[in-house]
Image (spheres, rainbow, N blue to C red):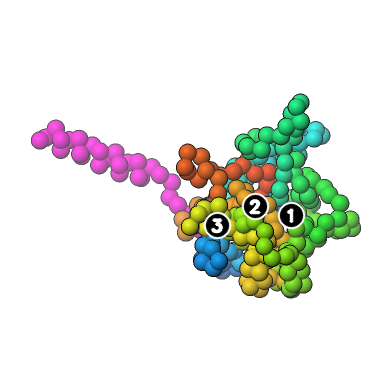
Amino acid sequence: MRFFLSIITGLLFLDVCLWAAEPKLTGAPNLNELGIKYTLKKSTDPIPNKIHVLRINLALNKVKPAVALGPDPDGDGPAEVSLTDPRKLASSPSVLAFINTNPWDSFPNAQGKKNRNWYSNQPVDIHGLAGTKGKMRSTMAPNNASVWFDVQGRVHFGHQPDDKPEEATTGFQLILSKGKLTVNPGGARHPRTAIGTDEKGKILWLVVVDGRQRRYSEGMNMHELASFMKELGCWTATNMDGGGSSIMGLLDKDGKLKVMNSPSDRSSGRVKIRPLPMILTITKSTNPKK
């Protein structure tokens, strides 16, 4: 009996010591005060869907967008970036939220085949305009699928030669322009990521739709996505990369970054976070308005 009591006492002492040795959590900033609001919307018509929405008030000037890119594996070589776990890309203490952005592709081997199994550190080519702090890692011809921010943090859709983006991303296509849908009904349903803004460019919406998960969330086609963005209040919206790349992260109440959605990739039946070339993060502004 004494032997078992000694073991229990020892385990309790060890547990207390381990607990005391853990660093104390400093907590998270009040996201609502910073102008960030997360909402999970559920839809059953015409199919079940889980839709993750971040509404960001840029007019408060308390947060700013920042692109986070993976490392460049070959300098002046053909590869622009190495695929990286998005949680690692978002590991800066200043990050409050993030979503995936640009599409990309791998390079063909000697037989002309491309490896699209997507693994960490895989060298890839980013599609579209991509850059941070005024330096573009990937450039492109003028395209209305670009979503970029100027040095004041204002959002713009579409890129022209004379524009000077501070933070730049690109999607697949503009799906909402001047409050009107630019895509036709129908089409395949997949996980989706979209970026939209109101007419004055003061409110930014980041949206991720879970998909490819039967009876839980099956995804949207372009028309459904555009209609949803319009219902939110968007004047302009772009469809970004989707499928297994669609992901949203947000700081929780303990100050830890949490993946909010259910990415569609699986490994042995478990969720597999796909490595990405880059993400768009929302960070706390260093010069907020008083």
Residue type at mark 3 is Glu
Q: Which mark is residue 172?
A: 1
Q: Are marks 1 and 2 in contact (CB under 8 Å)?
A: yes
Badge 3 marks a residue whose secondary structure is loop
- Which circle marks residue 242 in the picture? 2
Dominant secondary structure, magenta: helix
Q: Which callout, 1 or 3, points at the residue further toward the start of the chain?
A: 1
Q: Earlier in the sequence, mark 3 or mark 2?
A: 3
Q: From which residue to which does the magenta span run?
A: 1-28
Q: Which mark is residue 218?
A: 3
Q: Give the image location of residue 103, x and y in percent.
A: 71, 48
The disc labelled 1 sits on which kind of residue? Phe
Instruction: Give the distance between the C-alpha atoms of the residues marked 1 and 3, in whole angstroms.
Output: 20 Å
Estimate the x, y position of residue 259 in percent, counting from the top left.
Answer: 53, 52
- Seen as rendered, the residue at the extreme front is 186
The quadrant the N terminus occupies is top left
| Residue 57 appears in the picture as rendered | no
Of the 4 image quadrants, the one containing the C terminus is bottom right
The answer to whether any part of residue 10 appears in the image is yes
Residue shown at the point (82%, 47%) measured from the top left? 139
Up the image or down, 234 lies above or below 21; here it is below
